[in-house]
Amino acid sequence: MKKLIFGALVFLSGIAGILVLLVLAVNNPWDYNGITGIRGFLQGSQTLWIFIIFIIMFIGGLAICFYEAYFKK
């Protein structure tokens, strides 16, 4: 049960970080060498690696929760 809570916290942290970066991208449009949109914002503000880390946290937390809920005996 403790691993499930840990997975849920990692999942929620990942999704919160992704949402914060997406809101910032919408509120601060960026043009990075002709690249616009979310990708242009992430590259221009140098937050692409942070976004990738949040995606890994999201997927990892989801995997931990899925494993603990369905495969743990």
Image: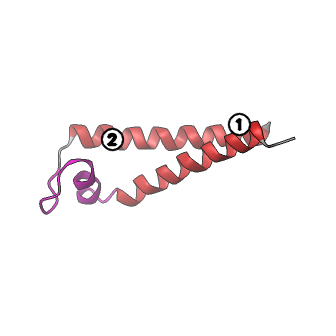
Count of picture labels:
2
- Left of 36 or right of it: where is 70? right
The location of residue 73, given as percent across then percent down, is: 87, 41
Task: Give, as a single range, the part of the protein colored magenta.
Answer: 30-47
Residue 45 is covered by the magenta coloring? yes
Q: Mark 1 points at which residue?
A: 5
- Left of 71 or right of it: where is 38? left
Residue type, mark 2 in image: Leu
- Left of 8 or right of it: where is 29? left
Say which label, 2 or 1, has the lower sequence index: 1
The location of residue 14, given as percent across then percent down, is: 51, 44
Q: In which quarter of the image is residue 68?
A: top right
- Left of 7 or right of it: where is 54? left
From the viewer's side, name the closer residue of 50 and 37: 37
Q: Residue at x 48, y 39 (%)?
A: 15
From the viewer's side, name the closer residue of 71 and 27: 71
